[in-house]
Amino acid sequence: MATPAQYAQNGSVSGIDRAHRSVIFASSLGTVFEWYDFYLYGSLSGVISKQFFSGVNETTGFIFALLAFAAGFFVRPFGALVFGRIGDLVGRKYTFLVTIVIMGSSTALVGMLPSYASIGVAAPIMLITLRLAQGLALGGEYGGAATYVAEHAPPGRRGFYTSWIQTTATFGLFLSLVVILLCRISFGDQFEAWGWRIPFLVSILLLAISVYIRLQLKESPAFLDLKNQGKLSKAPLTEAFGRWSNLKLVILALLGATAGQAVVWYGGQFYALFFLEKILQLDSKAANLIIAAGLLIGTPFFVVWGSVSDRIGRKTVVLAGCVLAAITYFPVFKGLTHYANPGLEAAVASNPVTVVADPADCSFQFDPIGKKTFKRSCDVAKSALAKAGVPYSNEDAPAGTVARLRIGTGAQAVYVGSFAGNTWSPADFKTANEDFGKRLKAALGAAGYPAKADMARVEYPMVIALCAYLVFLVTMVYGPIAAWLVEMFPTRIRYSSMSLPYHIGNGWFGGFLPVTSFAIVAATGGIYNGLWYPVIVASVTAVIGFLFLRETKGTSLT
């Protein structure tokens, strides 16, 4: 096999010679398919909540669906430990061949699962089990692909080479959105009944292609050199996490690099989609098309920033992206409201809604097992507003006061009284709740609140531009991250060492962003309050990374 120096001398016009193009293509294409599998669930969370969590109220069902999505992220660090160890002991190639088989099989099985209506609570249990299997597989996938490509890259080109791996997550999301849109168009009204299963079943074909491609790969030259010299680690997890010198670097890599990178990544892609669809209440097809267009425009910048990091450094680019996100998230998402649902923006400005209630009467309305019914007057009022997608503020009322909603301000304000159904029978509560919903809907309509976003008033170029900007920030923080992590750790424990901080950052800090932010919005009533989570995490990462992490550009892989 040619050395990095020989590869550099034989470069092609594109900047990558044929042998290296083969390595990057094979690694990247398989990873695209794996991310496609993983993102299908997130892109279809609205449908999933209806199919598998229909036994709870709408808001709880959606949050629970997001939690099931997050479950796959929760186990990613454990997959990183399991497969990272195997990758450092056995090799990079065979490890990420196993991961893609697990991922593809689990995804296809989701498309075959019976719904909650068919088998009850067993349906969400099986769904979550498959999500956990996906998460474990993905925990071993990324570290293997990034390490494999980096260990083939010539000196001074590592950021550029690994940035192609970084595009795979966005391409996977883009592919999932395109397949979903085609199925929505093809199956029409039947999509939510059974057509949603087709994108999952397509994974069978993608799995076959991925396995064939990865079987053609050869092992990483850096790994083979260590193996031939008898220098492979016999206990990679002990070396990586049992020795403080390396463990300290793992912790700093998490807090000073991947945590902020993760929240910017998931904020700019997934939370943007949730915000358009669930909070601004755009048509699902339109929201998916907008995000897909933003991804298409922004994705080339992964490679741009990867290449830039080869010249000015990984740390500079990644931390700059975190700072920009922290500064601009609030104005950008307010801009999305302005251009995507101007009717809602105008109504909030002219006739803000306030929940006037005894604070003791208000609950945090999240019931994962669906056994509670929130019947107190404040709960009734807030539940109705959350369902209608209407933001609100809170105002304390004297103890024992029945909650009411104030729509507008001053003498022109309109009040809609809630009701205390704590002791009522289910039938009486249902009747009263339906009556309250009708009164509230009429009052909100009179105050200018749209029931759904008026699609004729959506300024698509501006909404797409704002989403493309969010993806641009994603490319800044994500394009150079693989090279930065690879260069932090030695070859003998690289797979294990880089995988854990990456997957804790992206699996926990990033993966839990949608459910955390949406729960904050549902609890507080402020549609932008959920942004505080990514803004704070990105800011903390920028500070820690600047103070405690070194620049690795030019580091030799040993």
Image: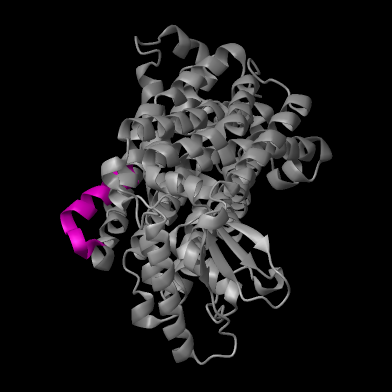
Classify residue 402 as left or right of residue 237: left
Q: Residue at the top extreme?
A: 9
Residue 10 image position (x, y, % from top left): 40, 9
Residue 451 image position (x, y, % from top left): 36, 58
Q: Would you say residue 491 sits in the magenta stretch?
A: no
What segment is highlighted magenta in the picture? 175-191
Identify the image quadrant of the N terminus: top left
Q: Is residue 196 above or below residue 35?
A: below
Q: Quadrant of residue 156?
A: top right
Q: Along the line of sight, which residue is nearer the eye, 124 or 219? A: 124
Q: Along the line of sight, which residue is nearer the eye, 129 or 181? A: 181
Q: In which quarter of the image is residue 147?
A: top right
Secondary structure, magenta segment, majority class: helix
**Residue 245 in view:** yes
**Residue 128 in view:** no
Residue 81 image position (x, y, % from top left): 63, 50
Q: In this view, does 399 lie above or below 13?
A: below
Q: Residue visible at 59% across and 85% down?
A: 422
Q: Would you say residue 189 sits in the magenta stretch?
A: yes
Q: In this view, does 390 lie above or below 471?
A: below
Q: Residue at the left extreme?
A: 186
What colour scheme governs how the chains and residues are painted in the rendered image of this protein? one colour
Q: Residue visible at 54% across and 81% down?
A: 373
Q: Residue visible at 58% across and 40% down?
A: 262
Residue 212 image position (x, y, % from top left): 32, 43
Q: Residue visible at 28% across and 58% down?
A: 201
Identify the image quadrant of the C terminus: top right
Classify residue 302 as left or right of residue 497: left
